[in-house]
Image (cartoon, rainbow, N blue to C red):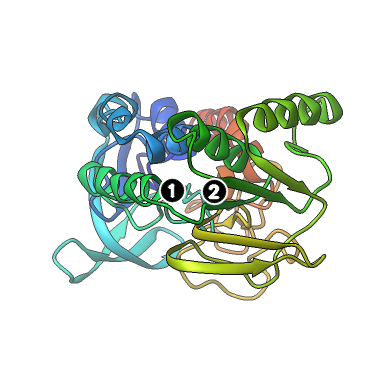
Amino acid sequence: MSSFIVIGAGWAGLAAVQKLEASTKITVLEVGSKDYVDINIANPRMAVEPQTAETAYQPLSKAIKRAELKHIKEIKEVSPGKVVVINAKGEEETLGADGIIIATGSKQSSPLMKDVTGKSKEERKAQFTAFRDAVKNSKAGVLVVGGGTTGVELAGEIRTDFSDVKCTLVSKSDLLLRGSAKRESMHKLALKQLETMGVNVVTGDYIEDLNEDYVGETKTITTKKGREIVADVVVVCAGGTPNVPFAVADGTLDVKTKGLVVDGAMLCEKLSSDENKPIWAVGDCTMYGGRGCSSILRLQHWLHLSRTS
């Protein structure tokens, strides 16, 4: 197999590139003008301290040595041996390859916490700066929705830099950080720390039909249990789903997770049944979420066998 197209330059896409680029021709497709490695776990810090983006956002050129990086506007179609895109000039273009790896990651309700439009480093810094200014000038307070790692980190960062700004965190789960290995102990630790910092933590409650960030006039938001929260800045750190930015046929996406259906080798048989033109999917865009990243090693092993058989 002599050529690959990798769709997405996030963690999973870059892992695939680094495993394969030494012996294979690779073209990496990235939507927009993104020119850096996106460190999603650092976004809550950068939202409050935009200057940290200078060191956190490292150039993609440092992660991609031999592969070609191609910026595009849109992915139109993925099928055996080809990817149809709208290129940077706004023209439809068909790109061919022996194999295709889809690594388009996930998307979240908050474009602040997760950008899927391909903003440049300077655009992201401007976005973070606008948020920091909104928090700094907040009169009613900030509402953070979601008790996972992103929400907990963001609430903590806000109170660290702006101890005079009211901050409320609402978690639908009774436990903060419920996805962690030691859920009970991590919840207690995070709760104690947030409350010590002055964050008003509400667990076991949620807000219906609140699916996007908000900055503006003061509004009163009522939770499902009737609690009223006043805020003029809202960040929704919940509701992450696989990002599959092109049309697919019925059965291609898992009904429950909405991620691409893959087999044990991370092959998307619904997208390609041609063993000579395989299509894989790895990372958060799959039915398995981030666990797909570890399958890069299996993918590399599969390629080795296909070359030697």
Q: Which residue is mark 1?
A: 99
Percent x, y for residue 300?
53, 30
The answer to which of marks 1 and 2 sits earlier in the sequence is 1
- Please give the label number shown on residue 294: none
Q: Is residue 48 visible?
A: yes
Query: How many residues crowd mark 2 within 10 Å: few (<14), some (14–19), many (20+)?
Result: many
Name which residue lies at 49% across and 43% down: 165
Name which residue lies at 68% across and 70% down: 251
Which of the two residues, 119 or 137, is positioned nearer the viewer here? 137
Q: Which residue is mark 2?
A: 280
> Circle 1 — which element?
strand
Percent x, y for residue 235?
52, 54
Percent x, y for residue 30?
31, 50
Extreme left residue here?
Answer: 89
The answer to whether mark 1 and mark 2 are in CB contact below 8 A is yes
Name which residue lies at 75% across and 24% down: 189
Percent x, y for residue 207?
70, 65
For the residues labelled 1 and 2, the Cα–Cα distance comes to: 8 Å
